[in-house]
Amino acid sequence: MTKKRIVVLYGGKADEHPISCISAASVLNAIDTERFEPIPVGITKNGSWIVDGEDPRGWNLDNGTLPEVKAVEGSREVVLDIALGQDGFFAKNGDSLESFGHVDAVFPVLHGPFGEDGTVQGLLEMMNVPYVGCGVLASAACMDKHYTKVLLAAAGIPVAPGITLDARSYDKDSKFAANGADILAQVQAAGLEYPLFVKPSRAGSSFGVTKVETENNADELAAAVFEASKHDWRVLIEQGINGREIECAVLAPKAGEQPRVSWPGEIVLDSRATDEDSFYDFDSKYMDSSASHVEVPANLPAETLERVRQTAAKAFVAVDGMGLSRVDSFVTPDGGVMVNEINTMPGFTSISMYPKAWEATGVGYSALITELIEGILR
């Protein structure tokens, strides 16, 4: 059997660059090399594509160091010829170009802007190259939490109450303190209950997220909005939900097929034993293994678990999802289900929720990668 040549893209310009590197390391270590010939292509933080850089298979977070794609001795720039499509991938050798050969598909293991937001997907669509994951519309809409909520609400799926701000005109010199009264007035007009979560609309891995607990404090709100604006000018202020955060993995490798949904899982914050106000931030996700653990299926009644699964499938269809997504929901004390966000390229390390949820549902990590790739091959 001829191996299929698969370009694995990782790194990128987003804040999630190091997490993409770790996800790609897991994929490259687990991919079935009897079926596939993976070609690792790293994207530096300034957007350059390279091959033959540092081998990502050795990357992990065990030593607390965040990996980064960098041009090193022996690495080569990647050049794309869009008109050549699947034959349009080249490595630069001085003044000449060396072809990758025919590329059967691309696995963009990219998180955040310039990777998970429809930009790379649009490039691959223009080249007519098959790729793993959601298309342009779903990728762009789900990268932007504001528009995710618009689509979900239109489909009749409950979402957290909140408002969206445009911070481009706010006073940077005062770190938005001059706009605090206006921000507070909008929160009050919307009737939002505390605590509030202030977050950038288009960012992931909890970058720029602040929990605001002091009611009617304009300065605290302004500072939180300023922090979020470092990552995106569009900022959400959402009402904190009294509920458990439950995550569900959705899988639809082949276009047009009905989505399959894993057992819902829960990230249990062990840090809440000593700090009840803690939340799932970047450090507890990736840097502190003692801060949390994964439970799949979540400890919920069977009928509630099924309601979460049905809601996740409905949300995936509502945003025109393809390939894979992780749908994150809140389950309230009365058993209600409210969708928080949809990740079209969720963390894909072997211990991330998405693979762990499928493993608990009967699909192993390597088999999951194989399904995703084979579903798009021509």
Image: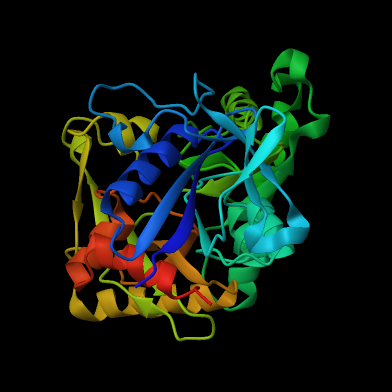
| Residue 368 higher or lower than 282, as above or below | below
Residue at horizontal 43%, vertical 80%?
259
The quarter of the picture where residue 282 lies is top left
Q: Residue 151 vs residue 297: left or right?
A: right
Residue at horizontal 51%, vertical 24%?
70
- How far across and how far down the image is residue 192, in percent? 57, 50
Is residue 270 visible in the rendered image? The answer is yes
Q: Nearer the viewer, residue 80 or 60?
A: 80
- How far across and how far down the image is residue 160, in percent? 52, 58
| Residue 225 higher or lower than 165, as above or below | above
Colour pattern = rainbow
- Which quadrant does the N terminus fall into? bottom left
User: Which residue is the extreme one toward the top?
Assistant: 173
Is residue 241 visible in the rendered image? The answer is no
Q: Nearer the viewer, residue 78 or 341?
A: 78
Q: Residue 285 vs residue 324: left or right?
A: left
Q: Residue 272 vs residue 155: left or right?
A: left
Residue at horizontal 45%, vertical 86%?
258
- How far across and how far down the image is residue 265, in percent? 26, 61
Residue at horizontal 24%, vertical 48%?
351
User: Which residue is the extreme one toward the right?
Assistant: 169
